[in-house]
Image (cartoon, rainbow, N blue to C red):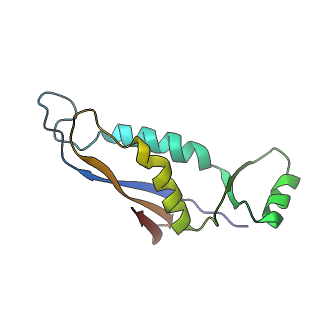
């Protein structure tokens, strides 16, 4: 087993909010809203956790032998950066919306394993 210090990035595209005198005027979506979504749907799920493929019986046995002193996230895919980018996209996509009627979409999700290595999933 080995670990990564992942960086999760959502790429959002669309039209800026044109409604006058609202705090989001000129934005696609407020960054604090994106941050909240990423915190709840990604960070809080995987932070300080072992991400393990459900078919990796050796890793699951090793983690089970450690007791309850750790967090394990079991996924139905091999947790490569590419697969994690797709998974993250699917977790976040339903929550990217606006109340102002501007067109808004999650264009891509990037997962960085290191500052120089990343994978991207685009719908």
Quadrant occupied by the C terminus: bottom left
Q: Quadrant of the rendered structure where residue 79 is?
A: bottom right
**Compared with residue 108, is residue 26 higher up or lower down, i.e. above or below?**
above
* Residue furthest out toward the bottom: 116
Give the image location of residue 25, x and y in percent.
17, 36
Quadrant occupied by the N terminus: bottom right
Give the image location of residue 109, x and y in percent.
42, 58
Residue visible at 50% across and 49% down in the picture: 91
* Residue situated in front as seen by the camera: 44 or 5: 44
Residue visible at 18% across and 28% down in the picture: 22
Residue 69 relative to residue 19: left or right: right
* Residue furthest out toward the right: 65
* Residue situated in front as seen by the camera: 111 or 56: 56
Residue 46 relative to residue 108: left or right: right
* Residue situated in front as seen by the camera: 26 or 95: 95
* Residue furthest out toward the top: 21
Residue 94 relative to residue 14: left or right: right
Residue visible at 81% across and 64% down in the picture: 57
**Compared with residue 35, is residue 12 higher up or lower down, i.e. above or below?**
below
Give the image location of residue 27, x and y in percent.
21, 42
Q: Quadrant of the rendered structure where residue 60 is?
A: bottom right
Give the image location of residue 61, x and y in percent.
85, 59
Number of labelled discs? 0
């Amino acid at each position: 087993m080995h670990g990564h210090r992942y960086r999760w990035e959502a790429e959002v595209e669309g039209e800026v909010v044109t409604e006058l005198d609202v705090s989001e005027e000129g934005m696609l979506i407020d960054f604090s809203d994106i941050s909240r979504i990423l915190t709840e749907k990604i960070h809080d799920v995987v932070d300080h956790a072992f991400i393990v493929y459900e078919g990796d019986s050796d890793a699951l046995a090793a983690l089970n032998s450690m007791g309850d002193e750790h967090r394990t996230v079991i996924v139905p895919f091999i947790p490569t950066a590419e697969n994690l980018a797709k998974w993250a996209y699917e977790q976040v996509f339903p929550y990217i919306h606006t109340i102002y009627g501007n067109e808004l979409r999650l264009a891509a999700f990037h997962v960085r394993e290191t500052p120089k290595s990343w994978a991207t999933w685009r719908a």
